[in-house]
Amino acid sequence: MALAAQAVLAVEVLEAVADRGYDDSQNVKQCLDAGITPYISKPPTSKNGPLGRFTKEAFTDDAAQDVYHCPAGESLTFRYVAKQKGRMMRHYEVPTLVCRNCKLKTQCTDAARGRKIDRWEDEPLLEAMRARVKANPQKMQQRKQIVEHPFGTLRHGMNQGYFLCRGLTKVRGEMSLSILSDNLKRVFNILGVEAMLAGLTARRTANA
Ligand code: SF4
């Protein structure tokens, strides 16, 4: 959608703000490669957090040494790189015996071979994005106000809960009509009918 918006707006530089459901590393990279700066919050995907175990954030990344330091002060060193779901992932581990003898093991992992950490080769792109999101909370707030509002209005205010049509083409038409109605209502409420008609007239004159 960000790439499509970039094409429609005919701009080279663009910022894209999306909710955490769109946190996909390959999409983030695709945006950056195209000159689009993405802002997406990190969703809680760790299975360790809900189990009361250390999440990846409890491990300190030492980029210069290419190791992670765990809460027990041990080092998870780089072991190998492998493709995982289309991404090249770097794997870091502590020697199995170290984890087995660790007093914090129950808070860390139930894996017999000890704790491992996976890191995407382009992880710095995600880390930079997390820092951007943290430094600009107003952008995420603005996204909610701009993007969530029409969906709430369409679904509840205009009773567009379920589509009445079937098939992609018809549903697209139904959705387009709903959005057009909402846009018109917004223009009436913000500008008023007279200002909207004056704007349309001015545009028609300019295009003539
Ligand atoms: S279990 Fe292993 S990785 Fe976890 S805190 Fe202990 S030594 Fe560190």
Image (spheres, rainbow, N blue to C red):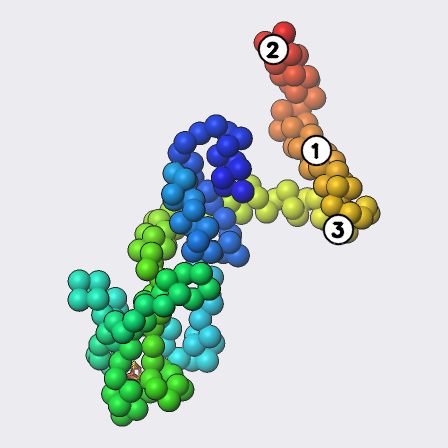
Q: Tell me the residue that label 3 is attached to.
A: 161
Mark toward the start of the polypeptide (2 vs 3): 3
Direction from residue 112 to residue 202 in the image, left or right: right
Q: Tell me the residue that label 2 is attached to.
A: 207
Residue 37 seen in this snapshot: no
Q: Check the image and report above or below for 69 versus 155.
A: below
Q: Amino acid at mark 3?
A: Gly
Label 1 element class: helix
Query: Residue shown at 33%/84% (left/top)?
Result: 114
**Label 2: how many residues lie within 10 Å, few (<14), some (14-19) or many (20+)?**
few
Mark toward the start of the polypeptide (3 vs 1): 3
Mark toward the start of the polypeptide (1 vs 2): 1
**Label 1: how many residues lie within 10 Å, few (<14), some (14-19) or many (20+)?**
few
Q: Amino acid at mark 1?
A: Leu
Q: Amino acid at mark 2?
A: Asn
Label 2 element class: helix
- Disc number lying in front (1 or 2): 2
Q: Tell me the residue that label 1 is attached to.
A: 180
Query: Residue shown at 25%/87% (left/top)?
Result: 98
- Total tally of numbered discs in the picture: 3
Where in the figure is residue 32, as x and y percent of width and height? 38, 44
Direction from residue 89 to residue 194 in the image, left or right: right
Where in the figure is residue 152, as x and y percent of width and height? 66, 48
Q: CA distance from mark 3 to mark 1?
A: 16 Å
Query: Residue shown at 51%/45% (left/top)?
Result: 143
Q: Are marks 3 and 1 in contact (CB under 8 Å)?
A: no
Given residues 188 and 11, the one toward you in this image is 11
For residue 189, what is the image quadrant? top right
Q: CA distance from mark 1 to mark 2?
A: 22 Å
Where in the figure is residue 151, as x and y percent of width and height? 65, 46
- Disc number lying in front (2 or 3): 2
Residue 101 seen in this snapshot: yes
